[in-house]
Image (cartoon, rainbow, N blue to C red):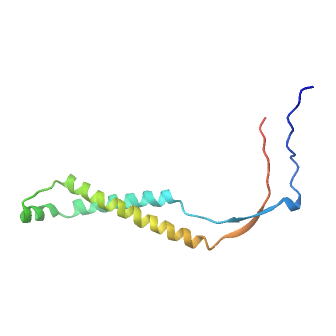
Amino acid sequence: MADEPRRPDLRPPARDELETVTVRRSPKYSAFLLAGAALGILTALILTFGFNGSAQVSENTGLEYSSGQVFGFLLLIFIPVGLAVMGGIALILDRTSGRRTRQVRVDHSLTRED
């Protein structure tokens, strides 16, 4: 007879096989960073089309920028600022939630698909 693979023991663990682990919640950084980028885009959009700053620049320097150029410049400034602000908020929330950890007892289970 060929050697058959050993099947794992599927009995429930004994009481002393339970393990204690630490559980804590943490924020989703990707959601905070996406919100920061969106906030930066919205701020750049409001500042570009809410105020007519290009007319004042052209009077003083003789240079004139289109609204698209102004929007691009402001995007280069406000997207990183939004990422930094929302990333900082996520870090602060992660640090404060780290204080509210709890201990739970878990057991190991094996599942096998044939």
x and y, in percent, of residue 107 in the image: 80, 57
Q: From the image, which quarter does the C terminus lie in? A: top right
Residue drawn at x 47%, y 61% is: 32
Q: Is residue 69 left or right of residue 15?
A: left
Q: Work out whether residue 34 or residue 51 is closer to the camera in this orientation and state it.
A: 34
x and y, in percent, of residue 90 in the image: 49, 66
The vertical placement of 91 against 30, above or below, is: below
Residue 88 falls in which quadrant of the image? bottom left
Residue farthest to the right, as pictured: 1
Residue drawn at x 70%, y 70% is: 102
Q: Is residue 9 left or right of residue 54?
A: right
Residue drawn at x 36%, y 64% is: 81
Q: From the image, which quarter does the N terminus lie in? A: top right
Residue drawn at x 87%, y 46% is: 9
x and y, in percent, of residue 14 in the image: 89, 57
Q: Is residue 29 left or right of residue 52?
A: right
* Count of numbered labels shown in the rendering: 0
x and y, in percent, of residue 77 in the image: 30, 61
Q: Is residue 59 left or right of residue 25?
A: left
Residue farthest to the front, as pictured: 3
Residue farthest to the top, as pictured: 1
